[in-house]
Amino acid sequence: MARLLYTLAVVALLPWAFFHLVWRSRRQPEYLQHWGERLGCYGARTAGDVIWIHAVSVGETRAAQPLVAALRQRHPGCQIVMSHMTPTGRQTAATLFGDSVLRVYLPYDTPWAVAAFLDRFRPKLGLVMETELWPNLVAACRQRVLPLLLVNARLSERSARRYARVAALARQTLSGLAAVAAQGEDDARRLRELGAPEVSVLGNVKFDIEPPPPQLALGDEFRRRIGDRPVFLCASTREGEEALILDAWPRDQRALLVIVPRHPQRFEEVAALVAARGLRVQRRSDQAPVGADTQVWLGDSMGEMFAYYAAADVAFVGGSLLDYGCQNLIEPCSIGRPVLIGPSTFNFAEAAREALAAGAALQVPEAPALAAEALALLADPARCTAMADAGRSFTARHRGAAARTLALIARFIPAGR
């Protein structure tokens, strides 16, 4: 009954869902593409056995990178199909994997669309990254005796409370999973309390992501464009955060403020915020050297975050100044950049706690403190070096989750197939 009511609600909301795609397309036209896939209609075909990975958007797609590499080595005869919900996730997969991975949208969670997806691709195994739980999808996989694993799973206290409001549906959905690989003990506990039957704590595969050498080379190129000025990077910023940062940042600084918004549809909006404050701005996309009088460099590109980190002296990780839960702070730690984060870290709660304890990161309560701490670090090379070393050590200690996850996957699909 719980799933029936859920299905009726999904069907009733389908017109709104497509209106939402049109609305989002005003700033990101890619939302108008591949609508048939949202309903289970696919032109793409596969040959041979298929391993299917669902990565809803950018973060999940990048997290899947070490798993994709390991699966391609262990199962060279298998085609990997990666499903997404956002155009940015799909584009990230194209950047990371090229044509070696087939990219599609996961259909909306109606029984007939889900059945069409599974009938088209007939995967031998399904992997869902992090916390994407779709009741009809899970039920269809269980009916087909298709092992569906939730991997690199995380569940914040806030999300657990939301799932608890529909406890019967959550329990039914989680019980249909073949296995769950949780990032940490807190995630595992919450998933078990909601009804997940088999939960292992295997760590966070994002620690296993290696900075791509071309990205590091691009970071060197960015640095040549900037010159010898100190660089404070505000990475993956979310709506509302840029205005706070711009208002707190002193204007008489030699240091360059670099802002890279999380979502590409906001590039123009952030450029307007900078201009409205009378600050001199350049864009990464203009391909020009950064002028000595430029105060803000806008990172208006996708898929280059490691390059921005490599070019920075100190990095703030966005989504943490306001209540968005923080973006991925592991990446700047892994390449030895001193990290600043705000008070909101629920998406990376365990990693944030451990990075702070290791001395790899510092936490600030609000934007003025962020600007002050960034400037203090830029003026203290010895302190920056100590934090950089702590960041590299912190990430090195936590590697290995991808190998452990691959061992779990091996229980459900034999090697070499």
Image: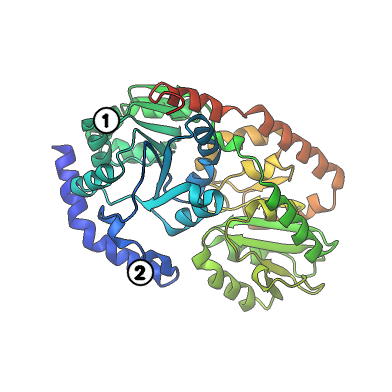
- Amino acid at pointer 1: Arg
Q: Earlier in the sequence, mark 1 or mark 2?
A: 2
| Residue 202 position in % (x across, y down) | 51, 25
Identity of the residue drawn at 72% across and 50% down: 216
Give the residue number, with chain letter if any, for mark 2: 23
Q: Residues within 10 Å of mark 2 (few under 14, many from 20)?
A: some
Q: Nearer the viewer, residue 95 or 335?
A: 95
Q: Nearer the viewer, residue 33 or 242?
A: 33
- Amino acid at pointer 2: Trp
| Residue 182 position in % (x across, y down) | 46, 29
Q: Is 95 rendered above or below residue 209?
A: below
Give the residue number, with chain letter if any, for mark 1: 171
Left-right relation of 290 to 413 = right
Left-right relation of 34 to 382 = left
CA distance separating discs 1 and 2: 34 Å
Q: In the structure shown, which secondary structural element does the residue marked by tag 1 occupy?
A: helix
Q: Which mark is residue 371?
A: none
Q: In the structure shown, which secondary structural element does the residue marked by tag 2 occupy?
A: helix
| Residue 135 position in % (x across, y down) | 26, 39
Q: Nearer the viewer, residue 97 or 178?
A: 97
Q: Quick one: quadrant of the C terminus?
A: top left
Q: Quick one: quadrant of the N terminus?
A: top left
